[in-house]
Image: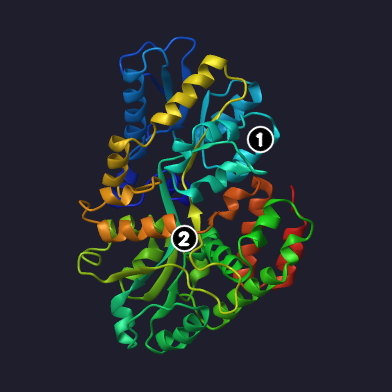
Amino acid sequence: MKRRNFLSLSAGAAAATGLAACGKSGPSDSSGGGGTAGADAASYWFLSGPPGEPIRQGAVDRFNKANPDNQVKVTTFQNDAYKDKLKTALGAGQAPTIIWGWGGGGLKSYVEAGQVDDLTDWFGQNAAVKDRLFKSSFGPATIDGKIYAMPAETVQPIVMLYNKEAFEKVGVQNPPQTWAEVMDLVPKFNAKGIAPFSLAGQSRWTNMMWLEFLFDRIGGPEVFGNVFNGQKDAWNNPASIESLTKIQELIKANGFIKGFASIAADTNADQALLYRGKAAMMLHGSWSYGIIQAEGGNFIKDGKLGYFNFPAVDGGKGDPSNTVGNAGQYLSIYSKASDKQKETAKKFFQSLLDDTEQEGWIKTGGVPIVQGSNAKLASSPDKDFLNFIYDVASKAKNFGQSWDQALSPTAAETLLDNIAKLFQLSISPQKFADNMNQVIGK
């Protein structure tokens, strides 16, 4: 399963077990809720398939039932079909009123084309709507200091997972808290025939997660922020070069599983290496919990899975509470929608993430982006992990978006290509920076 499909789903057992049955072909229309979806209805496109589709549809149904004069009409699409359909509709001036997306680079392209409305003033007038959500969820919704999307649904940070049995074999009880401790552990695990870290390097975005954290821990979020903002030669930042150097030092020290460049994330082989004790640790999305729970036998049930936030780097400027990943999903309002449709969309935004919707996401193993939603996690069998995810997301001073989502498709592909070369040690840190500087702003 590709990460972008995962990003449309929630972490947890239900998510993992639902993947095989995910989606149906072609678009599907539904208004729901008993209202009349006439010409003034606000159209809303989102992804089909469990676990997200029934929860999103439920939110629409409740809204339509409570607001007979403001109706929302739903059309659902499979992941890849959705992207193509939305791109075509935007180009033709026929996009839906409510645009579901991932924020960041995609949203920025809509903003630059004048295709979505600025919601900054609306959030200022509706502070209660904004204040109940994780502050970090507004990062990917904000372009040049203005808010262009409503954060929604769940949070999926990237976290460190570890095998407690592997740690016992090397006589270490606690996971590393600093980069120096990480490097100290590498030879200890290798001496016991255990790979320090599992990595599905063939997929490239898995390698990217390491750089996202190192850049943040060493130089703070502004290092990649300068890249995102198009600053000339931003990849030449000293913190950038130091981060690229450190990851190559870890590779040269045999920090990753042998043959990692041929392991694909789609197979879930990286998670299997962790729960089978072949690797001690793994940096991955919170959705990995559901995969391990579904495929790892009693590994979680027997208390063998541990987890922690990415370690600090000694002398680094970045706050260790910072995280990266998927800070939420995002709903924008199409600029060419009618005034009535825009009114309905904003009213619908105010209804999102009610108690029923939050409980729906929690049952799938997701953590809603609502302040205090942890109070609802107590009844979940996965409450320990979910509370950890809640703390990581809600306490993060900065929640960085995945780079390949933040950048344009052109820059993102160049990034992934150069990350693969960096991890193969076929290019130097400076060559990486030089190559990436060529696509800044493209």
Residue in the image at 71% along x and 51% along y: 229
Between 131 and 210, which is closer to the camera in this rendering? 131
Look at the picture and state if 321 lies above or below 349: below
Q: Considering only vertical position in the picture, is 229 above or below 333?
A: below
Residue 277 position within the rendered picture, expressed as x and y whole percent measured from the top left? 32, 75
Disc 2 and disc 1 in contact, CB within 8 angstroms: no
The residue that label 2 is drawn on is 264
From the top left corner, tell me how far across and down residue 108 is, in percent.
Answer: 64, 40
Query: For numbered disc 2, what is the local secondary structure?
Result: loop
Q: Nearer the viewer, mark 2 or mark 1?
A: 1
Q: Nearer the viewer, residue 351 or 307?
A: 351
Q: Position of residue 115 (x, y in %)?
A: 64, 28
- The disc at residue 218 is none
Tell me which corner region of the image, top left, top right, bottom left or bottom right, holds residue 193: bottom left
Question: Which residue is painted at 31% across and 25% down in the image?
Answer: 62
- Label disc, if present, on residue 111 of the rendered structure: 1
Helix, strand or loop status at disc 1? helix
Q: Position of residue 239 (x, y in %)?
A: 67, 70
Q: Nearer the viewer, residue 192 or 308?
A: 308
Q: Amino acid at mark 2?
A: Ala
- Say what amino acid the circle numbered 1 marks: Val
Q: Tell me how the rendering is colored.
A: rainbow
Callout 2 crowding tier (Cα within 10 Å): few <14, some 14–19, many ≥20: some
